[in-house]
């Protein structure tokens, strides 16, 4: 524990207070390994460090062996301005070097495993395009999230692959009708005023589940503004096991720098996380926050 790779560790501790006391006015960079093992005070400390213009780099597991978010990682994910997901290869010898995005216990050791073999350990190898996957395109308002999301959507449309778009009923900015109901069709509206028609309106994840049961052959799902959809984490956990490809947009945190909906929990589950930024009007620096 005294070293991280070839680097000496300044402090080995289980105490948040010990880390806090190690930081001086001259400290500009703070690197904490295994951050997810700490309690929720780690998120409070991290937020305070970022607010005081320090750079913070955290490492840690995003999922436990049950496939659920590890410790305080969702709270740390909500604060992140950049997310790097590192992956191993599935330990199954016949898995064709599929990326491992989960961990399991094999005897007394941890092993990396792909999502398919996590959910179905005895299944034969499957094509990567048939496995469940979650891509998240995130960032603050006006950062181009929906443009990036639309590019993913365009690829499946160019290949004539069936897909379903979901949109929260309450996301009705840009003058969209206020009298629409669940399962009506709405539009995804970009800040450029470009509109993507055919979005199914939902209020909860249960609405989404109901609609998918009525369209069992469609395995590509595109969801906008997921921070407004309660229950979406549990549904997504199930969909990935069933081989759905899911592509989302959302805000990880609100104007108060607190978790927004279940987005940060989904970040722990994701295969790809893309962070987007706009440009601050007064100073020209990258935009990472939302201001009410």
Image (tube, rainbow, N blue to C red):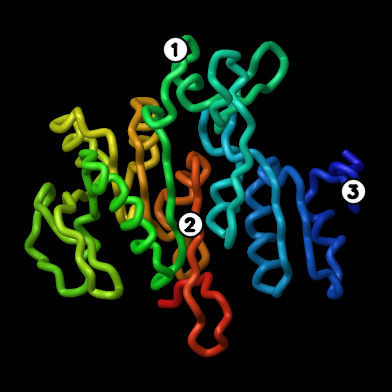
**CA–CA distance between discs 1 and 2?**
36 Å
Of residues 5 and 67, the one drawn nearer to the viewer in this rendering: 5
Q: Residue at x 50, y 50 (%)?
A: 273
Residue denoted by label 3: 7
What numbered label is drawn on residue 259? 2
What numbered label is drawn on residue 147? none
Q: Residue at x 34, y 56 (%)?
A: 151
Q: Residue at x 47, y 74 (%)?
A: 278
User: If the image is split into quadrants, where does the C terminus sit?
Assistant: bottom left
Position of residue 109 relative to residue 14, above or below, is above
Q: Secondary structure at mark 1?
A: loop
User: If the image is split into quadrants, where does the N terminus sit?
Assistant: top right
Asked if residue 7 can be seen in this view, the reply is yes
Q: How many marks?
A: 3
Quadrant for residue 72, please give it.
Answer: top right
Counting from the top left corner in percent of width and height, residue 80 is at 58, 58
The answer to whether residue 66 is left or right of residue 143 is right
What numbered label is drawn on residue 123? 1
**Marks 1, 3: nearer the viewer:** 1
Q: Secondary structure at mark 2?
A: loop
């Amino acid at each position: 524990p005294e070293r991280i790779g070839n680097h000496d560790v300044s402090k080995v501790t289980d105490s948040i207070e010990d880390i806090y006391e190690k930081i001086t006015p001259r400290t500009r960079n703070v690197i904490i390994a295994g951050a997810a093992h700490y309690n929720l005070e780690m998120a409070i400390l991290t937020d305070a460090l970022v607010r005081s213009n320090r750079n913070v780099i955290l490492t840690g597991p995003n999922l436990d062996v049950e496939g659920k978010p590890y410790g305080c990682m969702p709270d740390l994910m909500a604060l992140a301005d950049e997310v790097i997901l590192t992956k191993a290869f599935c330990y199954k010898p016949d898995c064709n070097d599929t990326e491992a995005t989960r961990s399991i216990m094999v005897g007394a050791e941890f092993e990396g495993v792909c999502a398919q073999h996590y959910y179905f350990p005895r299944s034969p190898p499957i094509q990567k395009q048939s496995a469940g996957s979650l891509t998240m395109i995130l960032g603050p308002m006006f950062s181009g999230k929906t443009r990036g999301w639309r590019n993913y959507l365009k690829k499946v449309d160019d290949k004539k692959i069936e897909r379903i778009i979901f949109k929260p009923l309450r996301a009705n900015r840009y003058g969209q009708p206020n009298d629409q109901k669940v399962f009506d069709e709405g539009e995804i509206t970009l800040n450029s005023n470009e509109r993507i028609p055919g979005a199914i309106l939902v209020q909860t994840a249960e609405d989404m589940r109901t609609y998918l049961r009525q369209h069992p052959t469609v395995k590509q799902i595109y969801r906008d503004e997921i921070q407004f959809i309660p229950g979406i984490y549990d549904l997504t956990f199930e969909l990935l096991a069933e081989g759905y490809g899911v592509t989302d947009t959302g805000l990880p945190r609100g104007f108060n720098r607190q978790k927004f909906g279940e987005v940060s929990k989904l970040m722990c589950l994701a295969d790809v996380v893309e962070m987007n930024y706009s440009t601050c009007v007064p100073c020209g620096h990258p935009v990472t926050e939302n201001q009410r």
